[in-house]
């Protein structure tokens, strides 16, 4: 956990990850930057070398792009960064006879703290708890999301469950799709959550809201990860929590 003052606000970051009980290793990747107001989570697709290589490449490339461009933070710069991620992941998997891809969800705050940017590919998510309301701010790029939205199959049906694993956008996709970019405000009292689907699939909305209200973000990280294990630990699970405070005048 660390704190980073940005103008009128101070950000408090904490993150963590667990392997769970299904996979032999952790194919999620977590980044909480030690110097910049920047955090990201990545979830490799599958449980092989392609998954491992995609996650490491995507995160390493995104971090390098953000650091090289700083303090510039805008939509064009972020789209350029994601384009580099797509190219790098495709190149990393070129010699592998298996899928090389991953999700990507990140929060980057502008230097003065006035605005943040969410960057998202796949089904890792970003939530915001504000004034007691927990909101999902991202859209899952999956066939399941489209199917439920358009009524192709009922929520919770076997067909919907299978479609959860059919990603329509991800890092490493052969068509190199663009990420969703969302400009967001940050207010004192906000709690932001970035998480892989090992969290959102296993910790229900009401429990998530309750745990995010913990006074310290590292407590919420611990309890959310324990919650995934209590639910069966069916996937790798990774969490970043960002709590926003008013900067105390000196």
Image: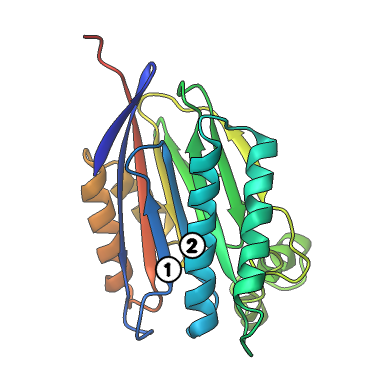
Residue at (47%, 76%) from the top-left corner?
52
**What is the secondary structure assignment of the residue under circle 1?**
strand
**Image quarter in which the N terminus is found:** top left
* Left or right: residue 250 compared with residue 119: left
Residue at (66%, 61%) from the top-left corner?
86
Question: Label 1, on which residue?
Answer: 28
Q: Position of residue 13 (x, y in %)?
A: 31, 41
Q: Nearer the viewer, residue 14 or 141?
A: 14
Q: Nearer the viewer, residue 240 or 227?
A: 240
Q: Which mark is residue 42?
A: 2
Q: Position of residue 219 (x, y in %)?
A: 21, 49
Task: Categorize mark 2 by other alpha carbons within 10 Å: few (<14), some (14-19), many (20+).
Answer: many
Task: Categorize mark 1 by other alpha carbons within 10 Å: few (<14), some (14-19), many (20+).
Answer: many
Q: Nearer the viewer, residue 33 or 225?
A: 33
Residue 46 showing in the rendered view: no
In the displayed structure, 104 sits above or below 184; it is below
Query: To which quarter of the image does residue 188 belong?
Result: top left
């Amino acid at each position: 956990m660390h704190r980073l003052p940005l103008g009128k606000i101070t950000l408090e970051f904490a993150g963590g990850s667990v392997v769970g009980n299904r996979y032999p290793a952790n194919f999620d990747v977590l980044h909480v930057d030690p110097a910049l107001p920047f955090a990201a989570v990545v979830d490799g697709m599958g449980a092989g070398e392609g998954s491992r290589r995609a996650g490491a490449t995507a995160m390493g490339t995104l971090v390098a792009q953000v650091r090289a461009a700083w303090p510039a933070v805008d939509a064009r710069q972020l789209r350029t960064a994601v384009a580099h991620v797509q190219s790098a992941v495709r190149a990393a998997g070129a010699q592998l006879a298996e899928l090389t891809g991953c999700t990507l969800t990140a929060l980057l705050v502008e230097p003065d703290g006035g605005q943040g940017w969410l960057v998202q590919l796949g089904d890792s998510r970003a939530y915001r708890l504000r004034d007691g309301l927990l909101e999902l701010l991202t859209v899952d790029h999956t066939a399941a999301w489209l199917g439920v939205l358009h009524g192709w199959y009922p929520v919770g049906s076997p067909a919907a469950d299978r479609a959860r694993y059919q990603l329509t956008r991800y890092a490493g996709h052969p068509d190199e799709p663009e990420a969703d970019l969302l400009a967001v405000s940050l207010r004192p009292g906000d709690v932001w959550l970035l998480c892989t689907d090992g969290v959102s699939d296993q910790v229900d909305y009401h429990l998530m809201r309750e745990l995010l209200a913990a006074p310290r973000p590292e407590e919420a990280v611990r309890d959310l990860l324990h919650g995934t294990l209590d639910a069966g630990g069916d996937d790798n699970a990774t969490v970043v929590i960002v709590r926003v405070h008013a900067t105390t005048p000196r």
